[in-house]
Amino acid sequence: MEIITGVERRRRWRAEDKLRVLAEAAQPGARTSEVARRHDISRGLLWYWRRQLRQGQLRVHDAPEPM
């Protein structure tokens, strides 16, 4: 029996991190389920990010360089 003591906050993923996970999943021989498990996300979320990337909704915005 599992006792739930509180609600876990949803994580916010930066575009850079999503792209890094997607690049890992795109490697030859990579398995979606293993990549998702390694990053503690669902396979569905990984597929959602892929769809966002295909549709141009997932981009790394240029940040100003520190001086």
Image: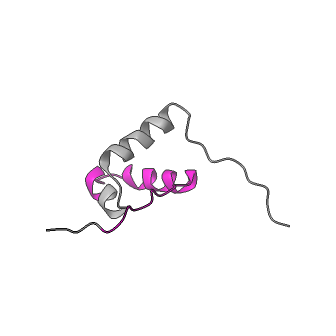
**Which residue is farthest front?**
5
In the image, residue 66 lies at what x, y percent? 81, 65
Residue beneath the point at 26% across and 53% down: 33
Q: Which residues are magenta?
A: 5-34
Instruction: Name the image quarter holding the N terminus.
Output: bottom left
In this picture, is 44 found above or below 30?
above
Please indicate whether residue 27 sits to the left or right of residue 16 in the image: left
In the image, residue 32 lies at what x, y percent? 30, 50
Verify whether residue 18 appears in magenta.
yes
**Which residue is farthest top?**
55
Instruction: Name the image quarter holding the C terminus.
Output: bottom right
Q: Between 44 and 24, which is closer to the camera in this rendering?
A: 44
Tell me how many marks there are.
Answer: 0
Residue beneath the point at 27% across and 58% down: 34
**Which residue is farthest left?**
1
In the image, residue 7 lies at what x, y percent? 38, 61
Verify whether residue 27 appears in magenta.
yes
Residue beneath the point at 50% across and 38% down: 53
In this picture, is 61 found above or below 40?
above
Residue beneath the point at 36% across and 65% down: 6
In the image, residue 2 lies at what x, y percent? 19, 68
Q: Between 65 and 9, which is closer to the camera in this rendering?
A: 9
Residue 16 sits in quarter: bottom right
In this picture, is 37 found above or below 45?
below
In the rendered view, how is the structure colored? one colour
Please indicate whether residue 61 sits to the left or right of residue 57 in the image: right
